[in-house]
Image (tube, rainbow, N blue to C red):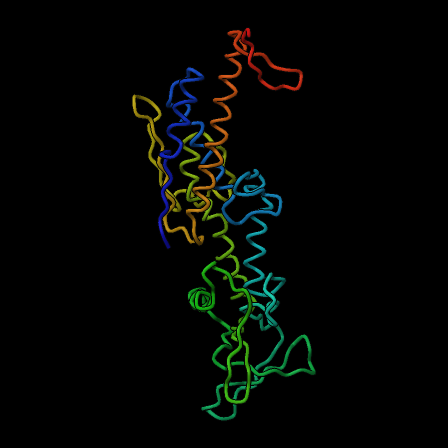
Amino acid sequence: MIDVTLNSGKLDLALERLAQSARVDLGKVIKQEAGNVARSIMMILPPTTRDAGTAAKPKSSGLAKAAKEQGENAIKADLFGGRRKSDARYSSIGLFQRIGSSSLQPPKRARTQTAAVNLGWERSKTIRIYHKFWRENASNDEMRKFHLRYRNKYGRVPFVSRSPIGRWQVQDQMWISNSSADSYLKSVQEKVGWAKAGFAAAALATGQRVPAWVRRHAARAGVESHNFTGDKPFLTGTATNIKVPNPDRYIDSALQFRAKITLKKVDAILANRAVNLGFARISGAGVVQENMPR
């Protein structure tokens, strides 16, 4: 887990040019454009929807309810099974298995590590499991430790592994009651939006709107400081304990994207001023052309 800080350093020149060109106080420009940067970062940080755009051109759907649902569904699939991108043989199996009406046949010998389970949904089928993974009343803390043990660097469980126990190959899967399953699923899904919320405080300081499912983490996921008045206006936002791999790439992409937009605003202002002063004209195709005598 690392902290990532956003500041307007890379945008300084573009923002100053925009303020000078538009003849607007620099503090107002920084407030608006830094807010747009923070919002752009939140739009491209996971979770996102399929139509959330790219790092080069993010879309507001990255903050839509559908993005929240995407994150919740990904967690549910990791924990209890579902479709994944992995091609591994056991990629559709979850890290946890609801016991339901299944029943355990305890091993007859104390040293036996495996046990038989009569599947409740397939009465005629019996499978072998790792005996110690039958944890009917597992606590959230116990399940969290088990979950963290098998997560990859992206925080996901792409497939459920298998372990050799004597002559058996058993799934590394914890068997739990419905109440334990529901409790842990809720606790993990409630964290959806944490990565985005790292820059929610900075966005809120500029007046940007932040959806509730991201805003709920703002006080713990990030901090900000700002001053939009005086000679040296600034905004600094820091995302604390962000768990997204290589978060700098999202920060850099958002900064580059907003710098490009800012410079386009400068060009538009200067072009319009050149037209008003008679130094340029706009063609029928909307192209700014020089209007000087030859």
**Quadrant the N terminus occupies:** bottom left
Does 72 appear above or below 215?
below
Residue lying at 40% horizontally and 38% vertically, measured from the top left:
201
Does 34 appear above or below 131?
above
Residue lying at 45% horizontally and 35% vertically, measured from the top left:
37
The location of residue 77, given as percent across then percent down, is 58, 61
Does 284 appear above or below 90?
above
Direction front: furthest residue: 294
Q: Which of 187 and 214 is in front in this view?
A: 214
Residue lying at 40% horizontally and 36% vertically, measured from the top left:
202
Residue lying at 58% horizontally and 70% vertically, measured from the top left:
98
Q: Nearer the viewer, residue 292 or 259?
A: 292
The location of residue 96, given as percent across then percent down, is 54, 69
Question: Does residue 129 appear left or right of residue 219 in this picture?
Answer: right
Does 243 appear above or below 178?
above
**Quadrant the C terminus occupies:** top right
The quadrant holding residue 127 is bottom right
The location of residue 23, given as percent across then percent down, is 42, 15
Direction bottom: furthest residue: 109
The location of residue 177, given as percent across then percent down, is 55, 70
Please state the total of marks drawn on the protein image. Answer: 0
The quadrant holding residue 226 is top left
Q: Which of 8 and 112 is in front in this view?
A: 8
